[in-house]
Structures are given as C-alpha cells and as structure tokens.
Image (cartoon, rainbow, N blue to C red):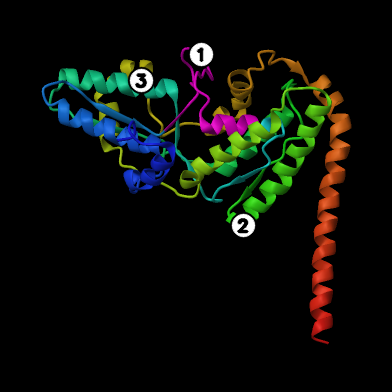
Amino acid sequence: MLQNSQRDEQAILLPHILARKPNTYIFTKSIAEDLVRESSNHLPVVVVRPSVVMPTLTEPFPYYSNDNNSLLSLGAGTSVGLLRVTGSARDNRLDIIPADMTVNCILAASWSIRVAPNAPQVYNYVGHESPALLRYFTQVYLRNLEESKESFGKVLWVPHHIAVENTYILFSLYYLLHILPGLFFSLAERYLNRKPMIMKIYRKLFFLSKSLRYFVFNNWSFTNDNTKSLLLKLNARDRELFDFNMASFDWYVYFSVLYRCCGFYVLKDYENNYPKELYKRKMQYIKPVDSAIRWSFRLAVVYISYSMLCAVVSRFT
C-alpha cells in the first residue's frame, strides 16, 4: 500500500496505520515480533525485548557504541553548547541498559531454549530495578564534563540545560534559545563562506526531541520474571562471564564518563584528549558574552513583569 501511494497520501494514512503506536519504529518492531511468533512454532526461537540500549559497560571495551541513539545525540548536543532546552517530566525514569549486558542476556536466552525446549520464549530485559532519573543523568553528565581534565575540541558555547514540562514554555524557550542564536550563527557562517550547518543541526535536534516526547513524559512498568529466572538458571561461573544483572547497577559511575563516548562516537572528536587549558582559553571570550546574555534576559523578564504589574495596579486604582 505504501509503495503505491504518494507522499501526501502516506501522511494521511500514517496515523490510521499506526493506530495507538507512537511511531513507525515501535510499529515495525511489533509487526516483526508478531511475524516471528506466527512462523516459528517448529523452530527454537526466543524473543528478547531490551529497553533503550546504551554503550557497552566492559566488552569489547568500555563505552563502545556504533549507534548514535537519541539519548547520546542529545547528550552530545548539550556538551557542545548547542542544545539548551529539552522537554521532559521531572520524575521521568530512564529505562536503559548497556549493550554488552544485552548481548549476554540474548546468549543466555538462546542457551535456555536449547537445553530446555519448554523454556519461556519472551524475555523483557529492562533496567527498572535500578532506575535512573533523566534529570539525574543530565546533572551527572554535565558536572563530570565540567570537572574533567579534557574537553571537546568542537565546543561552540557554554553548556547549559533546561528541562521543561509545559509545552508552551518549551516552544517559547526553544525559539528564544535555539532559533534566534541559530540564525545569528547562520549569518556568521555565510559571512565566513562556510557551509551552513547550525540550522540543519537544530532542525534535527527539534525532530529528535519531538520523537522522544512520548517516552520522556511517561514512565513505564515492565515484568521481567522470565529474565530473573533465566539469571538464576546460570551457575556462578556463567553469571560472572555472561552478567546481565541490573539490580545492583551503578548508574553514577556509568554516567560520569559517558561524555567521552558522546565525543568519540557522536561528535567524531577522535582527539578526546583536548586539553582543558585550550578549552578555558576558548571559553574566556565566550563566557562573558554568555553571562551578559543571561543577565540581560533575566533583567528583561523582571522589567516586563514589573511593567505588567504596574499596569494592572494602575488600572484598578
């Protein structure tokens, strides 16, 4: 049906095709799982449902990633000072898991169906037993980036981050803190005869934030009894070699060095030993401008609020 329809027709049909699914990614995963369920009665097949897969913890080496997933992209955008505003609930819990532990769970599930044909066929591999708040991730990430001995060579501005729940405030701040500075930098790019990139990046970040909205404003509960039982089936040696126990996972240690992964794999900043002295030298010109803009904005808000208050008072007196 999609192959024989035009783009405008697809835009009309898409909400009806997705039904209650938030996006095409979730929709196609559901179709694939249903296809496996219907066609694998005679095959030893298991389905492992991981939550958001993040860079590795230990194997093949720490913080390895070949996929620039949405969370890493947002972290990279915040690191270089481009992304300043995101929409999310304050109590939103990140259900994320390292990639190598996901692989361990898949291997254990495959072993289980081989030695016990009547073993469960679906395993939810999630991290809700060791939850991590989204705002906690952002705080730890930026604090360790600030305190680290190295930095990014591609940094453009002082990193700031504002998490907003209200949609109207979110779009207002987005235009004020993203679109307007983006237009200024676009003019600078044209003046320097460089390829215009800033507005394209902001456009991608906007659509990325929009696609994540459904997930960062809701919390999810999963049952993982099958996964717990699978872990208990392994002997002590196998639990050590194929560890996928999320109950005692230390997210602080994991988040504290995640900025290096963002710099290397997302920003392609392969010189990850960019000295902090060069960063500070670069920031000595940017930080005063940043502080002046922030204080000007605060004073403007105070002035507008005071003027509105005076107008209301004078109207009723």
User: Which disc, if any, is residue 61?
Assistant: 1
Foreground residue among 313 and 158? 313
Mark 2 or mark 3, which has the lower sequence index? 3
Expressed as whole percent of the image width and height from the top left, the position of residue 85 reads 65, 44
Residue 93 shows in the view: yes
Expressed as whole percent of the image width and height from the top left, the position of residue 105 reads 33, 24
Q: Are marks 2 and 3 in contact (CB under 8 Å)?
A: no
Q: Residue at x 50, y 41 (%)?
A: 212
Residue type at tag 2: Tyr
Side of 251 where 51 appears, left or right: left
Q: Residue at x 64, y 32 (%)?
A: 200
The residue indicated by pointer 2 is 168
Which of the 4 quarters of the picture holds residue 268? top right
Q: CA distance from mark 1 to mark 2?
A: 43 Å
Give the residues drawn in magenta, as a range. Answer: 52-77
Q: Residue at x 23, y 34 (%)?
A: 34
The residue indicated by pointer 3 is 104
Q: Nearer the viewer, mark 2 or mark 3?
A: 2
